[in-house]
Amino acid sequence: MEFYQKLGASLDSIASNGSELLRQSENVSTGTGPYEDKSEAIHHPRKKLMESAMRLLHLVTMPEEYLDHLANGVRFTILLPHPPNLTRSTQHADIKTLHPVSRVDLRPMARGPRRPAARDGSIAYPELAAKAGVPEKHLKGVARMAVLNGFLEEPASGRVAHGRPSALLVRDENFMSWARWMMDYSMPVAYKFAEATRRWGDTDAKNQTAFNVAEDTADPFFDHVRKNPDLTAVFSGYMRNVTASRPWSLAHAVECFDWASLPPGAKVVDVGGSHGQLAVEVASGFPHLQFVVQDLPETVEAAQKAFEADKGIEPAVKARIRFMPADFFQPQAVLDAHVYFLRMIIHDWPDGDARVILRNLRAALEANPGARILIMDTILPPPGSTTLQHEQQLRVRDLMMMQVFNARERELENWKALLGDVGMEIDRLRQPDDSVMGLLTVRLQNTAPPPGSPGEFVQVKKPMMPATEARPVLIMGAGISGLCLAQALKRHNVPFRVFERDAAVDSRPQGYRLKLRRDAAVALAESLPAEVYRTFQTSCANLAIGETDFNPFTGLVVNSRAGGGLSGKLGLHPSYCVDRAAFRATLMSGIEGRVRFSKEMTSCEMDEDRGVVTVTFRDGESAEGRFLVGADGLHSVVRRHLVPAHTIKDTGAACIYGKTPMSPAVLERFPEKGMRWMTIVSDQPPMLQSCIIGDAPVTLLLEPIRFSQVSRSQHQLPADYIYWALIGPEARFRVDGETPPTSKVDGGGGGGGSSTSAQAASTDAARLSLSITQEWHPSLRSVLEHQVASQATLIRVVSSVPDVPAWPPSAMATLLGDAVHPMSPCGGVGAQTAICDACSLAETIAAAQGSPTAEEIGAFEEAMRIRARRSILQSEMGSKKMFGLRSLEDCGAWNGL
């Protein structure tokens, strides 16, 4: 019962927001409504709502209701045997043919000087029926069916007006041609599919199709179209609308192939290129390329005239495009091109004819092994692997190809088999988001371009099912590494979503300053968007290199050295010092809408056949994606699902992080030489106590964090402060024989208890830091006495072993940072290593458009293990010095969550 109450509340909310959406859509007829807004803020929620609504309708429809829903659509379609013929006018717009036995002339749509219309642009049914010369009851019945289906509107009782679809027909002549084609030809052909199948059975003949039955012609489709001027005009308008719409857009061909990598003067042949739209689009963006547009002689003749007369094409673009009569059923005459482009060609032909087309291009590849065939065509996805709307579009196209051409749309395996039959193979593949077509780069089987060949170019390998807004890369954890990965994916235009179990980005302490060395700085420069990287650089704290060591009991300097003490073979020279909170805020910039808080993952399911990973959260919600990244830190839920046997070691040490304002009171008491750079205070146990608790020291590491006035003038930064960490054997951190509860501080997605319990834990940690150092010299202890108690955090120090165990790589998920290789803070390289992980993974994911193979992930994970080994060895060395760690291999397993 509780579930249905929640469902009812959710539906009420959707209904309320839906009303607001409709209100905002009132200006759609002028092109100013939200549906014309292509921004992600509008586009993604709209698509998500549509997908959810379609799936919800499937789920709630009872079996006995299914045919009723189907009948509604069929009856409405029958009422539109011809498309509405809308003509634009300053005074009115016409809608014709809303009834199979009459043509209705509707004139309500705009007010004019000669006859005022209703304010809502409507007209009364009696007036419209009289003008149309049809019975009012027929008109009203048909119109109200159109209103029910969203085609028309009835703004007031007894009055009818344009709806959004009919208004679009008024505005867009190409859309009108599309509608005429679909209603006058495509649908009648669909009705004859069964009859054609009964008559001819399993045939590939181009003149034995449902189209031949519907049109009562013995000619194949294109021959019949060429003989009928009106049909030719309608089909041309239909194709212009198809090309202009996003799912069929030429923009995908421009954006999703690496044209820039082709050498200067490279030649592109557009096979069956019609009027050269693709050539114009690509040539406009890539002035170093030359184009040849091939088509049948009569098409080329008309295209050439239209091309020369088109004043909208720049002369410099026209100079690099020439038209050439050609038949793709004959051998290819141009053998020196770099790319042979076929857009929506192969799907028009059955396999036998398709093999002929491809064999005629094979000679070009044999003459120039560096050349490629680029096929932009439909690739049917596995059922259920994409959104319902997207799959519906593809299935409709598949049936249309069968009904008109005895051809079909092909699945990936069909494409591989077809190409294999002619000695070719897929080199690279991409399926752009929002496109009904994929891009296949094709080469000769078992060949690669020889180094330095004229046709050689480099392009990133693309997957079959890339990440989309509906199924993005899912990143668990909004810590430093998770956000670095997110920003890098944003830079590469790979859809992603970040889920963080904390309530907010600043809901708990997570350490304070980070020191990043050259490799992390270079990785950030190469991965972050330029503006984000500039903000990172200009928001960093002042950096001073050196170390001063103090005796904890005398307060005197025992060692000190400026500069090179941190450099040398280990490469410990830092490049940047950054406040963690400021850095996270920088990494959140521009992606706030893609990060969701209070989302604690509980489980995940991976469907490799569909290429979909589904994550379920504690609140009952779920999310689907192409790939899952566990950047959720030490307490990683992703790790528990992906690598349940993975072992992390308990070092036997604890650490308290803290923050002390750089107040006059502290600066007066703390030694001046300790406020220059990094300062170390090492507390060795007395001799007899060391016999009981060992000779491991407790070490205080601190560093002043100061920001320049230049940085402060550009960014919101914290007041100057002293960062410190007190680390030592767990036995030294006990109170009444027990270690206080530790906080879940890690690389991201840590989680924790209530704010009250967290505050109490921080207060206890602050008191513990004072208790441990009660024998210290007052000057040194002052930094702890003036700390912000609410910022103190006690953690258990755990680590992976240097040789991080391998696991079978997955094409669906991976881990990075503390989620897989946590390490002691004594090396100062944990965050640095996680950042490098994130940037490396971003390259792998971006190269595969969000859907990498298991082999690609395996290569990333192997490189990550090598990187982690160096860092863990360094942190192990520091741990031996700071708290007496013996060996990570000898440590017991950590049993924390």
Image: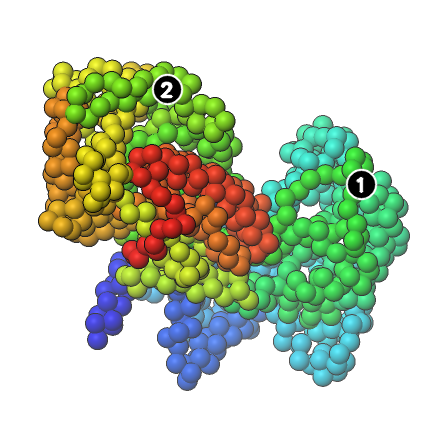
Q: Nearer the viewer, residue 195 or 582?
A: 582
Query: In the figure, is residue 87 to the left or right of 670?
Result: right
Mark 2: secondary structure: loop
Quarter of the rendering containing residue 344 = bottom right
Q: Residue at x 71, y 55 (%)?
A: 426
Pinpoint residue 747: horizontal percent, then vertical percent.
Answer: 35, 44
Residue at label 2?
A: 545
Quadrant location, the N terminus? bottom left
Pinpoint residue 369: horizontal percent, then vertical percent.
Answer: 82, 45
Q: Nearer the viewer, residue 431 or 776?
A: 776
Pinpoint residue 567: horizontal percent, then vertical percent.
Answer: 44, 23
Relative height, residue 243 to residue 209 (above, below): above
Query: Label 2 sits on what residue type?
Result: Ile
Query: In the figure, is residue 267 to the left or right of 182?
Result: right
Residue at label 1?
A: 450
Mark 1: secondary structure: loop
